[in-house]
Amino acid sequence: MTVANDGELRAVYAPPAPRAAQKVLDHLDVHCRNFIGLSPFCVLSSSDASGHADASPRGDPPGFVKVLDEKTLLLPDRPGNNQVDSLQNVVENPGVGLLFFVPGMNETLRVKGKAEITTDPELLDPLTVSGRPPRSGLKVVVEEAFLHCGRALIRGRIWDSDAQIDRSSYPTYGQVLADQIAGADARAIDADEDEANRERLY
């Protein structure tokens, strides 16, 4: 059976615990700000005007997402493949979600809000790493923020070292792309990625 409306969905699930709604804030309190300050990694979700969704990983030294005030975040955009999927989405639809991770913690922090792209040097220059400021940043006005329980990461054993795979059990990035792109050279792609990871992170 396909669930088609809220009534059918609620027939499957019990009512949420009262604290599930009570914990949702409309701003970043001291605990949210501290969590973001500890986080070296987050996932940015966005969608275009037609509702086509995307999720993009973002990582940097802990605290790379700056809390400008209790309602505003600034997320730097670092060098990548210049496809700018998330930024194009924000141009069409400012609604975004952020999921923050802290290594060793099973809880995550969820933030929802409206984003705009800024190229203001006054905002971006303090986010400089290795002498290179970001080309742009996402300025996010926070609408909701809350701590998410740790059960998903516990089930997934994300931080357990003995849960890590033997890396040789999955092809390299270059090998995957060579299988997907006609004429692509796996060794050349892997060599280019290795060089980029060494010399062009910023």
Image: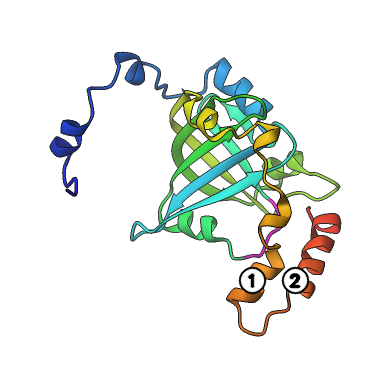
In this rendering, would 50 be left or right of 192? Answer: left
| Residue 85 position within the rendered picture, expressed as x and y whole percent measured from the top left | 53, 60
Part of the protein shown in magenta:
78-82
Asked if disc 2 and disc 1 are in contact, CB closer than 8 Å, the reply is yes
Q: Please determine whether, in this image, residue 186 is positioned above or below residue 100.
A: below
Q: Sort mark 2 into few (<14), some (14-19) or many (20+) by Cα contacts within 10 Å.
A: some
| Residue 92 position within the rendered picture, expressed as x and y whole percent measured from the top left | 42, 58
Q: Which residue is mark 2?
A: 189
Task: Tell me the amino acid under the disc marked 1.
Answer: Leu
Residue 80 drawn in magenta: yes
The quadrant in which residue 158 appears is top right
Colouring scheme applied when the structure was drawn:
rainbow
**As drawn, which residue projects farthest toward the bottom?**
183
Mostly what secondary structure, the magenta segment?
loop
Q: Please determine whether, in this image, residue 2 is positioned above or below residue 108.
A: below
Q: Secondary structure at mark 1?
A: helix
Residue that appears at 48% across and 47% down: 45
Q: 70 or 121, which is in the foreground? A: 70
Residue 45 drawn in magenta: no
CA gap between label 2 and label 1 equals 8 Å
Q: 78 or 171, which is in the foreground? A: 171
Q: 12 or 79, which is in the foreground? A: 12
Label drawn at residue 177: 1
